[in-house]
Amino acid sequence: MHIVVVGCGFAGLEAARMLRKKAKELEITMIDRKPRFDYPPAYPEVLSGKVTPDEIACDLKPIVTKVRAEFIRAEVVTLDLQAKKVRTEATSDGEERDIPYDVLLLAIGAEQTFFGIPGAEEHSYSVNTLKNTIATKNALDNLDYSRKNVILVIGAGLTGVEVAGELVDYFRDRNAPVRIYLVEMMPRILPALPKEEIATHVRRFLSHRGVELLTETAVQEVNERKILFKDGRELRYDLIIWTAGIKPNRLLEHLDVPKVKGWLKVDPYLRVEGMHDVFAVGDTAWFEHEGVRSGQNVEEATGQGKVAAENIIRSLKGKKLKRYRPKNTIQNPRTLISLGDDKGVIYLRGLMVRIFAYRLKKFVEHRYMRMF
């Protein structure tokens, strides 16, 4: 029995590990275009230099070898769910490769979206991948510190807030003048969190550190060195860091299966709806059951990977499948947010915790990274 796992992030690796633990005889193939596994929640701290890329990344091959799976480093170009084949990009000999499967697990994550705003992608940096984060750090290092730079962070969700805090630390450590703007089109920062109390606290904290917050401010166009907002305002800038949202992986666009806003709609057992041999987990999947929707975070990715693996084994044995029960949901999220200056805030079960928040965040990060 051949299981193909596309994507070697937290969801894919956890699934492969559980598959091997439950069934020694399975043939497992893992595919990813990247040679290294890394920890995305730590990307903002790469900008300030608190962590290095090597500290939050490691080679994938030893991890995959440990679960006795074949690792193929390649770009997946098509998914043929009818023929049950995954096609990868042309190799050095000029040939594409078709990889057949009995069961397919999709854990391919998401992509940065620029919402079709003219010039946004061309003139912005990001922290959506480790490669892009390193490029952003290099751009920061190459700024002219003899004058006051203007840095714009577009999108005041969890990532945008953390990036703004780390930028303050970056320029403070260099004793360099700077104006940092955090721009959000919604009425308040952290719009995905249900309670306004935490957004108010974070706003005050960042404002006290010198970050200028622009809410209800939508970007209309980005030109070289100038950004235009829909309310008619303009700002000169030296660097833009775009953190305003994600979209489904482009591989999903041509799949003729049930979707919600482009994400693969999965049933309570994490199978793509209407299919018995294709599972989807992590940022690839839209899981919503009985009014509860799974969040898109590391905790949910690993939880889904584990349950999907168990259900693959159960389906192969003809046993009753296990329902997935999300813990870190859209309706009731729990998150740890770093704010720079070794400070942070925790949102858990509707409560805000500030004491030891940053230390706890680092402890949780270390625990997740040690898993692999």
Image (cartoon, helix red, strand yellow):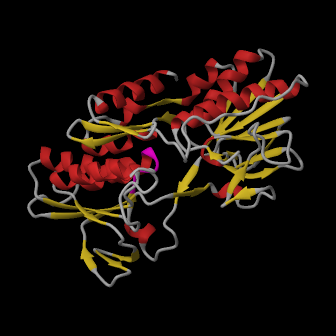
Question: Quadrant location of residue 218?
Answer: bottom left
Question: What residue is shown at x 73% (from left), y 28% (from top)?
Answer: 309
x then y, percent, for residue 178:
15, 59
Query: Does the rendering let one see residue 45?
Result: yes
Q: Which quadrant would residue 183 be assigned to in this image? A: bottom left
Residue 9 shows in this picture: no
Q: Quadrant of residue 179?
A: bottom left
Most foreground residue, 62 or 213:
213
Q: On the rendered structure, is 356 left or right of 103?
A: left
- Number of callouts: 0
Pinpoint residue 141: horizontal percent, then vertical percent. Answer: 23, 51
Query: Along the horizontal axis of the image, is 333 left or right of 180?
Result: right
Residue 296 placement (x, y as % from top left)? 55, 45
Image point (40%, 68%), residue name: 185
Taking the magenta stretch, the answer to whether it contains residue 13 is no
Is residue 197 shown above or below 353? Answer: below
Look at the image and tell me in which quarter the N terminus lies. Answer: top right
Q: In the picture provided, is 213 more to the left or to the right than 19?
A: left
The part of the chain drawn in magenta is 126-130
Residue closer to the observer: 248 or 260: 260
Q: Is 139 placed above or below 217 here?
A: above
Percent coordinates x, y for residue 43 in the rendering: 38, 43
Q: Residue at x 49, y 42 (%)?
A: 333
Q: Main secondary structure of the magenta part?
A: loop
Q: Residue furthest bottom?
A: 232
